[in-house]
Amino acid sequence: MNQLHVTTTRNGRARDCESIKYHYACALRYETVDGVKVTGLRQTLFDCARHHELNDALPVIKSALHGGFVAQADLANDFDTLPGRHRAHALSVLLHAI
């Protein structure tokens, strides 16, 4: 996980490079933290779990669960319902984390 991952709409004109990986979303929901637009925690966890290998995604998901930042049932529901590809991989990561 040595790249910055940026979620953007298809309107954005961005190309991946060595240090930045772009992910496109048609219905982008975000919140603003310290003036920066970011995806919410549960969306970020889903994206991490579906886009990264198990050994990179697992510590992130486990930390969120065991740190009490998100409930297991909520995350399972999100992983089942949020739009996006690679859902099976995300669910696999979640199963390993619990």
Image (spheres, grey):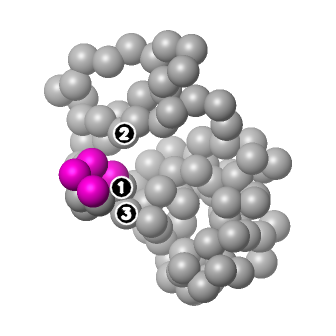
Distance in Å between CA atoms under marks 1 and 3: 4 Å
The answer to whether 62 appears left or right of 15 in the picture is right
| Pointer 2 local density, CA inside 10 Å: few below 14, some 14–19, many at least 20 | many
Which corner quadrant of the image does residue 67 belong to?
bottom right
**What is the x, y in percent for residue 8?**
29, 36
Residue 37 on the magenta segment: yes
Any part of residue 81 in sight: yes
Residue linked to disc 3: 40
**Residues at badges 1 and 3 in contact (C-beta under 8 Å)?**
yes
**Residues at badges 1 and 2 in contact (C-beta under 8 Å)?**
yes
Element under label 3? loop
**What is the x, y in percent for residue 79?**
53, 66
Residue linked to disc 2: 7
Distance in Å between CA atoms under marks 3 and 2: 12 Å
| Earlier residue among tags 3 and 2 | 2
**What is the x, y in percent for residue 32?**
24, 58
Q: Residue sitting at 70 percent across and 52 percent down?
A: 57
| Earlier residue among tags 1 and 2 | 2
Residue linked to disc 1: 39
Distance in Å between CA atoms under marks 1 and 2: 8 Å
The answer to whether 81 appears left or right of 35 in the picture is right
Q: Residue sitting at 53 percent across and 58 percent down?
A: 46
Element under label 2? strand
Q: Residue sitting at 51 percent across and 33 percent down?
A: 4
The answer to whether 67 appears left or right of 45 in the picture is right
Any part of residue 88 in sight: no
Magenta-drawn segment = 34-38
| Pointer 1 local density, CA inside 10 Å: few below 14, some 14–19, many at least 20 | some
Q: Which amino acid, by three-letter code, is at mark 2?
A: Thr
Which residue is more in the foreground, 46 or 20?
20
